[in-house]
C-alpha cells in the first residue's frame, strides 16, 4: 500500500505560465502502478482533471527531457510514496549506489537528496490500514479545491461572473434533501455554459457522483440517446466500460442506479424536451421532494461589458484616450453579449486608431460574420414579444 502527499505549484493571477497538465503523478512503477496509482489516476480523470502519468519510464532509466518538461508544465504534483520509492529513478535511487556511480558529479546526488527531503516533509495522506477509495476521494477533493482556488484567483478575467455564480448556487440549496432541478436560460453567447462549468467545479466534490454532459444537442444529432445515457452513467459511476446490455433497460436502470445517490448532473445545451426526459426525466429518479427553479443569464451591464471588451481589445492594458469613444461605439454593436464582446475585442486588438475607425464604420455596412452569427442566434432565441 502507498501513502501520498500533495505538492502545490499554483500560478498567481498574473502568471502567464502555459500549464499543459493540471496534475503530475510521481510514483515508483513497480510498487503502485497497477494498484493505488492506477485507481487514483482513473479518479482524477473521471473528474476531468488533466493528469500526466508516465507509462514508459522503466527501472534504471534516466529521467527524460520530456518527463522533465511534463513536470514543469504541471500545475500540481502528487507524490506517491511507497516501499521502494527511494529507489525510483525519478527522484534518486539508493543514494549509496548513486554516490558511487556519480562520484564525479556529487552535486546531482545532493539535489536528489534535497528534493526527496522536501517531498517527505509535505502534508498528505497515509493509506495504510485505510480503504483506498476513502483516501482517493480525499485526494481528489483536495486537488479539485486547489484548482477551483487557482481559478478563483483569475476571476477578474471572468467579468461579471461572481454575482452570477452566487445567485445560481443559492438556487441549488446544496444542503437540502430535496431533488432540485434548475434550468439556466438566456440568449446564445450569453455565457450559460461558462456559468454552469464554474459552479460545477466549485461544488462537485460535495456529491457522491457527478457528471458534466457537454453539447447534448450536438451529441444527439450524431448518436442515439442510449449512448448518451451510457456516457452519463459512466461519469457518475466511475465505470468506463459499462455493459451495453444494461441499456436494454434504459431509463429504468438509470433510476435504479441513481435513486440512492447524492448526484450532481449538468446537461449542457439541451434544446429538446426529449433529451431532458431521457437523461434526467423526473424528480423521482433521484429521490424524494421536488423543487424546480430557473436562472436567467442576462447581458453584461455597461461597466462589465466595457471591462470584458478592454480585456480582449487591449490585453489588460488601459486604452489611451483616443480609443475611449471608439470603445463606446464597439459596445453599442455587441449589445452586452460576452461572446460578441470577446470576438470583436480580439478582432480590433493591436490595430491603430485609424484602423479602428475604419473597421467600426465598415461594421455598420458589412457586419463582422462571427459577431453577427452570435447576435443572430441571440435574436432568434427571443420570443416574439422580446423581438418586438
Image (cartoon, rainbow, N blue to C red):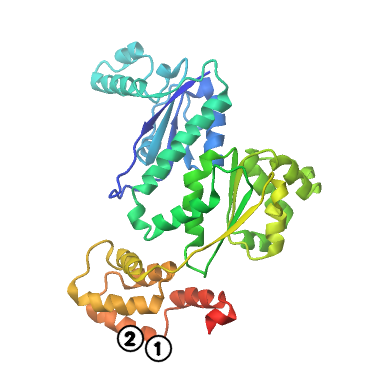
Residue depicted at 30% across the width and 19% down the height: 113
Q: Residue furthest left?
A: 321
Q: Horizontal and vertical percent for residue 170?
A: 49, 51
Q: Residues within 10 Å of mark 1 (few under 14, many from 20)?
A: few
Residue depicted at 43% across the width and 67% down the height: 339
Question: Depth check: 201 or 92 in front?
Answer: 201
Q: Horizontal and vertical percent for residue 22?
A: 43, 41
Q: What residue sits right under mark 1 in the picture?
A: 365
Q: CA distance from mark 1 to mark 2?
A: 7 Å
Q: Is residue 149 above or below residue 358?
A: above
Question: Depth check: 13 or 387 in front?
Answer: 387
Q: Is residue 349 left or right of residue 220?
A: left
Q: Horizontal and vertical percent for residue 278?
A: 72, 55
Q: Horizontal and vertical percent for residue 349?
A: 30, 69
Q: What residue sits right under mark 2 in the picture?
A: 361
* Residue 223 in sight in this render: no
Element carrying mark 2: helix
Q: Is residue 106 above or below residue 331?
A: above
Residue depicted at 33% across the width and 16% down the height: 98
Amino acid at each position: 500500500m502507498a501513502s501520498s502527499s500533495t505538492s502545490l505549484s499554483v500560478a498567481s493571477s498574473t502568471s502567464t505560465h502555459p500549464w499543459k497538465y493540471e496534475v503530475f503523478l510521481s510514483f515508483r512503477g513497480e510498487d503502485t502502478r497497477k494498484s493505488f496509482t492506477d485507481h487514483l489516476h482513473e479518479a482524477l480523470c473521471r473528474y476531468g482533471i488533466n493528469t500526466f502519468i508516465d507509462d514508459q519510464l522503466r527501472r534504471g532509466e534516466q529521467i527524460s527531457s520530456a518527463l522533465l518538461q511534463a513536470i514543469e508544465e504541471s500545475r500540481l504534483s502528487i507524490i506517491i510514496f511507497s516501499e521502494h520509492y527511494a529507489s525510483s529513478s525519478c527522484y534518486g535511487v539508493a543514494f549509496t549506489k548513486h554516490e558511487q556511480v556519480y562520484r564525479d558529479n556529487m552535486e546531482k546526488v545532493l539535489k536528489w537528496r534535497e528534493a526527496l527531503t522536501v517531498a517527505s516533509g509535505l502534508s498528505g495522506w497515509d493509506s495504510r490500514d485505510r480503504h483506498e477509495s476513502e483516501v482517493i476521494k480525499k485526494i481528489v477533493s483536495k486537488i479539485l479545491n486547489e484548482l477551483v482556488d487557482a481559478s478563483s484567483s483569475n476571476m477578474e478575467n471572468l467579468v461579471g461572473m461572481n454575482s452570477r455564480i452566487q445567485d445560481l448556487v443559492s438556487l441549488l440549496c446544496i444542503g437540502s434533501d430535496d431533488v432540485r432541478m434548475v434550468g439556466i436560460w438566456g440568449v446564445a453567447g450569453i455565457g450559460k455554459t461558462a456559468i454552469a462549468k464554474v459552479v460545477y467545479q466549485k461544488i462537485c466534490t460535495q456529491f457522491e457522483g457527478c457528471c458534466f454532459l457537454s453539447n447534448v444537442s450536438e451529441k444527439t444529432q450524431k448518436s442515439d440517446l442510449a449512448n448518451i445515457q451510457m456516457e452519463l452513467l459512466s461519469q457518475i459511476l466511475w465505470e468506463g466500460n459499462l455493459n451495453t446490455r444494461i441499456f436494454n433497460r434504459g431509463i429504468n436502470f438509470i433510476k435504479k442506479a441513481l435513486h440512492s445517490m447524492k448526484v450532481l448532473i449538468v446537461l449542457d445545451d439541451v434544446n429538446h424536451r426529449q433529451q431532458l426526459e431521457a437523461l434526467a426525466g423526473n424528480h423521482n429518479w433521484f429521490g424524494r421532494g421536488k423543487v424546480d427553479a430557473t436562472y436567467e443569464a442576462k447581458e453584461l451591464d455597461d461597466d462589465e461589458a466595457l471591462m470584458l471588451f478592454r480585456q480582449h481589445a487591449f490585453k489588460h492594458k488601459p486604452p489611451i484616450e483616443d480609443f475611449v469613444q471608439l470603445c463606446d461605439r464597439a459596445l453599442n454593436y455587441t449589445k452586452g453579449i460576452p461572446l460578441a464582446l470577446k470576438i470583436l475585442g480580439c478582432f480590433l486588438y493591436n490595430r491603430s486608431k485609424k484602423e479602428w475607425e475604419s473597421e467600426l464604420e465598415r461594421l455598420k455596412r458589412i457586419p463582422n460574420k462571427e459577431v453577427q452569427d452570435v447576435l443572430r442566434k441571440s435574436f432568434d432565441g427571443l420570443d416574439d414579444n422580446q423581438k418586438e
